Image (cartoon, rainbow, N blue to C red):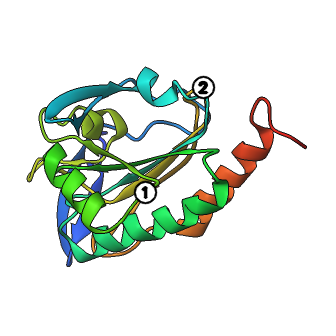
Amino acid sequence: MTDETATPRCVTFRETAYTLAGAVPEIGQVVPDFRLSKWLDATRIEVTLDDTLSAGLPVLFSVVQSVDAPISRLQAKTFDLKLAEFEGAVVGAQVSSDLPNTINRFLYQEDILRLDGLSDYFDQNFGRAFGVLIEEARILTRAVFVIDWQGVLHHAEVVPEITQQPDYESAIAVLRRLVVNAPGAIA
């Protein structure tokens, strides 16, 4: 008899392996619902999948551990610049393990205008639902997800080494395709 226990999914941070909780949703499937938090007028607001899809636009989730990490700052700035080409035809979300007010401060200080700051700090619900929660540290790993206006996953990248940048161009190419094929898009 053999032990068919699944090998845990892991990421590394400078060659040390860390286990990821949950499973990444499958491409072509509707992503699971989630709860994230944002800070608006000194009030914590809960954000769900339905809230994110309410604009009827494709969504890019840029996921990082903390906005205070240099590569995370670069990731947010890079996606913010790349989202400019869509002129409001997509929703961008910067998801991190930071408190909502920390994320807002960062977005304001860095003049990031196209990413909404969302926090998974309170219950790590998003991290578990999307398979990107580092179990040992209870923080998110670096990842990128692109969903369409119905919540169907079209792109998922969990960066294997936390100190590396994601593949920006692959995510943006998927967004371009979704924008062209979106309901109401002008051909």
Q: Residue at x 58, y 31 (%)?
A: 152
Quarter of the figure with residue 12: bottom left
Is residue 13 visible from the viewing direction of this image? yes
Q: Which residue is mark 2?
A: 150
The amino acid beneath tag 1 is: Leu
- Crowding around mark 1 (Cα neighbors within 10 Å: few <14, some 14 to 19, many 20+) is some
Quarter of the figure with residue 149: top right
Q: Nearer the viewer, residue 110 or 72?
A: 110
Residue lying at the far right of the rendered structure: 187
- On the rendered image, what quadrant is the C terminus found in? top right
Residue 19 on image: x %, y %: 20, 52
The amino acid beneath tag 2 is: Gln
Residue 68 on image: x %, y %: 17, 67
Residue 94 on image: x %, y %: 35, 51
Q: Which residue is mark 1?
A: 113
Q: Nearer the viewer, residue 15 or 182?
A: 182
Q: Nearer the viewer, residue 77 or 143?
A: 77
- Provide the secondary structure element on which disc 2 rests: loop
